[in-house]
Image: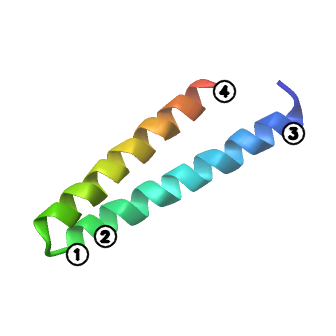
Amino acid sequence: MTSKELLYIEDALGHQKFLETICKESATKIQDVELKALATQYEAKHKELFGKLYSLL
């Protein structure tokens, strides 16, 4: 893996972790049950994507 590819993956990992955190925080603040479930689903998806990207390292 080139250094440029490594930097790209590290950047993508940071984005996925940020999005996971935002979704988690949003889910705790949302009152609507359906929207809360959607935010929780997105949190899980970003966590999954983080794991897939991390496995490339």
Give x and y (percent) for residue 20: 42, 55
- Point 21% across, 74% down: residue: 30
Q: Residue at x 42, y 36 (%)?
A: 48
Apparent side of residue 9 relative to residue 31 in the rendered image (left or right) = right
Sequence-first disc among 3 and 1? 3
Which numbered dot is residue 4? 3
Tag 1 secondary structure:
helix
User: In terms of image quadrants, where is residue 36?
Assistant: bottom left
Closer to viewer: mark 1 or mark 4: 1
Amino acid type of the residue that numbered disc 1 sits on in the rendered structure: Lys
Q: In this view, does 26 lie to the left or right of 28?
A: right
Here the colouring is: rainbow
Task: For mark 2, give the secondary structure.
Answer: helix
The C terminus sits in image quarter: top right
Q: Which of marks 1 and 4 is nearer the N terminus?
A: 1
Residue 29's mark?
Answer: 1
Q: Answer few, some or many: residues within 10 Å of disc 1's Cα (few below 14, many 20 plus, some between 14 and 19).
A: few
Indicate the amino acid at tag 3. Lys
How packed mark 2 is, by other alpha carbons closer than 10 Å (few <14, some 14-19, many 20 or more), is some
Q: Mark 2 points at which residue?
A: 26
Q: How crowded is mark 4: few (under 14 residues within 10 Å), some or many (20 or more)?
A: few
Q: Do the residues labelled 3 and 2 touch (CB within 8 Å)?
A: no
Q: Name the residue under label 4.
A: 57
